[in-house]
Amino acid sequence: MSGRRVLLHCNAGVEAGMGHLMRTLTIARTARDRGWQASVFGDVDEVGADILRRMDPELELFTPDGAAAGLDDFAALGRDADVIHLDTYREVPDLSALGPLLSNMQDGPFGVRDADLAIDGNLASERTFASPERSRSHLAGIDAAVVRAQVLARRDVTRTPSATPRVLIVMGGTDPHGVTARVVSAFDRIASRVEITVIDPRRRPDVLSAAKASRHAVEVLGFVDDLPALAASHDLAVTAAGTSVWDFACMGVPMALVCVADNQRAGYRQVVGQGLAVGLGEPPHEGFEERIASLADLLASPASLAETAAELKRTVDGLGSWRIVASWEQLLTTRPSLVSRPGVVARAATVDDGPRLFEWRNDPGVRHNSRSRGELDWGSHSDWLARSLQNPDRRLLIIESDGVPVATCRWDRRSADEWEISITVAPESRGRGLAASVLDAAERSLTARPPVRMVATVHRDNTASRRLFERAGYLPHLPTDDAGFVTLARWRLTSAEV
């Protein structure tokens, strides 16, 4: 048991929707599984409270009696927490003087505030991350998407396509434009038989009427405790572009998206733009019915559905809540600190550095902490150096202190936005406190334009190296693998990063 406590704040209900609550419940469960105590505070109506009790009956919920008293209660509860995690678009009091680590979930420009850790788990949010200067540490992009345990349990379940295509329609708790009924009615434009399940917690008359009049078999359900299990039995989900998108993607459920609220526009356009879902439109939803009719071809092609499902699962790995809680744990023990020593600079390596690099590479200490621990021969090393110097996706550097070579750094491009770093400090330069300055010089030499994710892979037993990257602000990215290596990462989100 860690003995640590997190207070999570969100607002939820019939009017506010349930997306913030679903994320909050998932993060709370992940924290508790790792030994944390967790409680939730917020303006949660009786419907939201009932959902919380059913999904996690042991999780304590505090609700305010009134606006002013509520903020006071929130601050009082926060003083006893190690972490305060905020997932709300509403104003909250200034919590900086309380002492806990402040963790904040934002969605594009919504919910942005000062925090120790800022999180935007929307697709490609690393390119549109709002006000990164307001936080020291960041989790950005789809890897930070919060995915529930119920979803992960369905991720690797193999299912056989239905003889009759099955479609799930779920627009969340608000549906301000009455889209659900319109979707149900629009499916009448598809001539082939379809089985439709509609989630409508309010069981609104227009939805029930559209279901009754449909040419297809339509079942209308209220709130479902295990929506992932239900979704996994369907061939396509027609859904609002909210937080449930990442649940469906992680399970590999193909989607057609509807933007039903202003805070969904950016996410909707990113998902549709990258071809991960069929776009059905934004308010005022003109031409909506015609786009629904176009789904007929997709539903009639099991191969297309299967290809889409595989791509969605590759995109969302489901580790977002692990990354958030693991980052809390690291930041509570190691706050990032910038270190720069005058005279420590990086230069490009040359062929003349071959003997020096060969000697450093074969040092027993270096080999012990490498994936490849064998001793390298000169011929293989020379060939590697020649290839490295010509490789446009590699930056091989020599780090000098006052003109004396003290280390080498290699950057390898792993994707358009990701570079992996490897550092070797010369045996004779160890113990001089140079490592942090070496890393700083190496990072300054990486001139790729933001956004850039800098990644470091270190062995779990290499405590000094891991602490080096943690102090530099690299956060947990992947758990320890079978060979004992853990992956840390840090985003460079702006050209003038704080």
Image (cartoon, grey):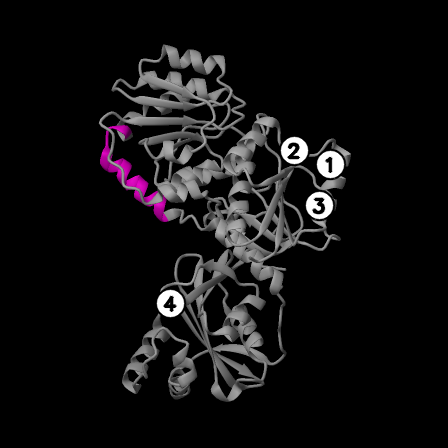
In which quadrant is the N terminus drawn?
bottom right
Say what secondary structure mark 2 lies in. loop
Q: Residues within 10 Å of mark 3 (few under 14, many from 20)?
A: some
- Residue position marked by numbered label 2 in the rendering: 43
For badge 3, the amino acid type reads Leu
- Residue position marked by numbered label 1 in the rendering: 70
> What is the x, y in percent for residue 274?
39, 42
Sequence-first tag of 1 and 4: 1
- Residue position marked by numbered label 4 in the rendering: 392
Measured in 3D between alpha carbons, the distance from the residue under mark 1 to the one under mark 2, in whole angstroms, is: 9 Å
- Mark 2 or 4, which is nearer the eye? 2
Does residue 262 lie above or below 442 as drawn? above
Sequence-first tag of 2 and 4: 2
Horizontal relation, residue 374 to residue 19: left or right: left
Give the residue drawn at x 51%, y 84%.
Answer: 406
Residue range in magenta is: 299-314
Please report contact status of discs 1 and 4: CB closer than 8 Å, yes or no.
no
Q: Residues within 10 Å of mark 1 (few under 14, many from 20)?
A: some
Q: Residues within 10 Å of mark 4 (few under 14, many from 20)?
A: few
Sequence-first tag of 3 and 2: 2
> What is the x, y in percent for residue 337?
63, 67
Q: Nearer the viewer, residue 412 or 456?
A: 456
